[in-house]
Amino acid sequence: MRINKENYTHYNMRNNQHILRKPGLLLLLAFLFSSFQAIATPPVKSIHTSMEIVSKYVQKKYKKDAVRLALRLSSENKNYHALDINVSDNLKSSIYDALVSIHLSNLPDAQTVTRLHKLHTFPSPTVDRFFLVYERKSAWAKPLRLGEKETDSKKMNELLEKYGLVIDTNREWDEEHNSLHVRANEPLNVARLVEEFKKIDGVIKIDMLQPDGDGNDIEVKATEAGWMVNYILKFESCISGCKKRHYWSFEVNEEGDVIFLGEFGDELPEWMREEKPLAEGR
């Protein structure tokens, strides 16, 4: 039996039996996570994570995860363009704190999902970038034609400034059009944001750069204690939709305590279960 003795983490195992071996609990966890999209906006939880600093890279990854998860919870039918461009600060911060709490936990299973498998949300919905095609001769595009990364469009400039957007590249698309790759400094609801860019004269196409296929993911569900967090490792034929999934479930309460609830799903291939040294640092 593995028990973490630190007062802010707990390991949920009884009589040396893993939750995976308890059909009743397995069915309960499966039911809870199968109903995620039935929640419009869950109650906001105030979770206080450790003061230990995580790297900027890790912070950036979890901020994107938190915004994606907040958007999924806020739209039952994935109608993201009907939501606000900026996601609720309280909601995304609460989810972010829960994810970081698990990342900082010394529980072996928490380290498995965050350090060994490095699981994050599948990049849908898009929260940080989009691709825009415009008519090269548009009057507002003159600075772009001169090699600048700015425009003469009042509407576009206001959007770029207000939402912290950066034009990364301006390239030729075809004989009559150019393309812009636009990046957000902080994650937001790109589906709603691009609706504003579509109103600009000369813009003919916008692609939110969402990947096809399937991949690893994270799910969250609000509970009375805080958040239930499900990490999903997917494998086998993921280009057409992963056929197999393996889950690790955790609960994080309002104080940031992390409880491991169990591991279940399809058996991992040997190469995925291979022991690897955990990356140093945070």
Image (spheres, rainbow, N blue to C red):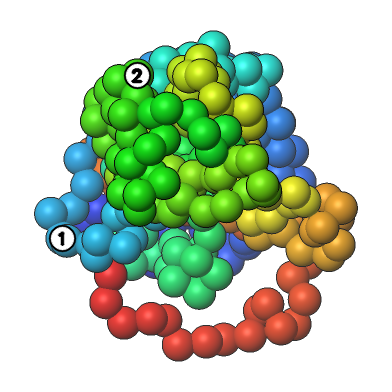
Where disc 1 sits, the SS reads loop
Residue at (56, 44) in percent of width and height: 178
Question: Closer to the N terminus: mark 2 or mark 1?
Answer: 1
Q: CA distance from mark 2 to mark 1?
A: 41 Å
Q: Quadrant of the C terminus?
A: bottom left
| In the depicted structure, whether residue 269 falls above or below residue 81 | below
Does the image show residue 122? no
Any mark on residue 281, and which? none
x and y, in percent, of residue 123 in the image: 57, 47
Q: Which residue is mark 1?
A: 52
| Rendering coords of residue 166 (x, y %) | 33, 44
Q: Dot 2: what SS? A: helix
Residue at 31% from the left image edge and 49% from the top image edge: 148
Q: Quadrant of residue 244?
A: bottom right
Label 1 Cα crowd, 10 Å radius (few <14 / some 14-19 / many 20+) = few
- The image position of residue 131, as x and y in percent, is 55, 42
Q: Does residue 130 lie above or below 271 as drawn?
A: above
Q: Residue furthest left?
A: 51
Is any atom of residue 185 visible in this view? yes
Name the residue beneath numbered marker 2.
155
Left/right of residue 202 with respect to residue 280 in the rendered view: right
Task: Please state which of residues 19 and 49 is positioned toward the viewer in this rendering.
Answer: 49
Residue shown at 18%/53% (left/top)? 50
Q: Foreground residue, 159 or 262?
A: 159
Q: Quick one: label 2, few (<14), some, or many (20+) residues within 10 Å?
A: some
Tell me residue 250's x, y (percent): 48, 48
Amino acid type at mark 2? Lys
Question: In the depicted view, which residue is nearer to us: 2 or 139?
Answer: 139
Q: Residue at x 25, y 61 (%)?
A: 56
Question: Is 147 on the left-hand or right-hand side of 260?
Answer: left
